[in-house]
Image (tube, grey):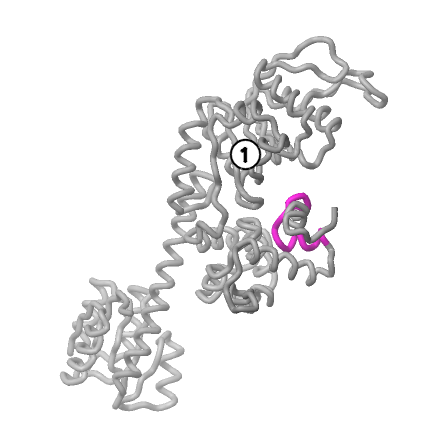
Amino acid sequence: MRMSGRVLIVDDEKIAVENLQHIMKKEGYDVVSTQSSTYALKLLSESAFDVVLTDLKMGSVDGMQVLKKSKETNPQAEVIIITGYATLESAVKTIKEGAFYYVAKPFRLEEVRKVVKEAIEKVLLKKENNFLKEQLENVFAKTLIITQNKKMEALMKTAVQAAPTDCNILIIGESGTGKEVFARFIHTNSNRRGGPFIGINCSTFTGELLTNELFGHEKGAFTGANSVKKGLMEVAAGGTLFLDEITEMAPPMQAKLLRAIQEREIMRIGGTESIVIDTRFVAATNRDLADLIKTGGFRQDLYFRLNVVALNLPPLCERKDDIPLLSYYFLKKYSSIMKKSVVEISPQVISILNEYDFPGNVRELENIIERGIIMANGNTLEPSHLSEDLRSLTIKTFRKKDNKLLTLDEQEMAYIKWVLNECNGNKTLAAETLGLDRVSLWRKLKKYALISE
């Protein structure tokens, strides 16, 4: 596979220049060559090269001066020194001055080809990393959603269009895909941005407690109600109320929420007067609402009220082009928090992450990068800083007895079983490892019949 890259060849021997120029052009590089080392310094001042191939011993200007000029004008470029007077001392000196490699004459063209290819790969990786960092800075300045994925960008466009209309929005996506981040994005782009953004996870409260949280209560409404408590629907006045895990809401509570949305008024527990509410509702779920409606688990009329605009967030395995960008975002975030100087991610780590399917989605990727920074000692995140499980786990790990690949559900079930075993059956630890909350893990365990009723 040919790679793009710009190469400067400097050698006062004509035959050496011609041979190197021929092989470099054959590799597909943009090649500039000269037999004048003085002219080479001028070229380095006027143009940018990715790799410089230079002879060491040349007239009034030698290869060391070419090396220094290259590092001065373009620090990202790599310089390869070629010499017919190879000594250990000169080799050590050039490497100390920043040379990428030291090649002795007479050289083998295959050796030079290989060294230049490695140097080009290193330079292009640096350029890509710098581009990702710059892109990250631009994205972060405008929005909390870190993406370069076309589908995600389309969803953001829809969200921006819907945000100022005050309509109710339903966000659908697996755990860890960033549903609350999207809800905050909608709030920030709405006319309610100056008001509060309040979120509540409906799965963490029983029916009565959830009613109390959302609607509030009057003084003396029940034992222990020693003062008036405003519900979140009141507290979110002028802002946005985010109802996460909306499908975990009990049927009686669903009916109360439907009426509140329709009538735009509520009554506190123990109250006798209606209270007008002014809040925008954004709901989220990781479940199949169509199936729940069919089985009576969720009210169809409430679904229609909430689902004015629907945003279906893709899992991370369907937006793998975001993995490097998100990885650098989390790298910057946790390096700053931990006060560590980890600023790079090795290509091997990116490759490992790209091969992984992330059942815990973005939240799991964040956990992986955070753990890697904890383990890192230098300025680069390396494979050795990842968990051994992640380094060794690939999709080829799980096959049926007939050597056929597992289906996605079979793959997920096998992985969950494996994680549970590694966690000695501790579901809390397993959920954390998978990047899931306990409710989501419980559903998956039930789905795959990994727990008894």
Viewer-proximal residue among 222 and 427: 427
In the displayed structure, 378 sits above or below 439; it is: below
Task: Provide the residue span drawn in magenta.
Answer: 427-440
User: Image quarter for residue 28?
Assistant: bottom left
Kindly identify which residue carries mark 1. Answer: 290
Viewer-proximal residue among 452 and 6: 452
Rendered residue at 53%/68% (across/down)? 402
* Residue 119 in view in this figure: yes
In the displayed structure, 378 sits above or below 233; it is: below
Residue 186 location (% of width, % of height): 48, 31
Query: Residue reaching furthest left?
Result: 14
- The amino acid sitting under disc 1 is Ala
User: Image quarter for residue 390?
Assistant: bottom right
User: Image quarter for residue 77?
Assistant: bottom left
Rendered residue at 57%/66% (across/down)? 385
Rendered residue at 65%/12% (across/down)? 275
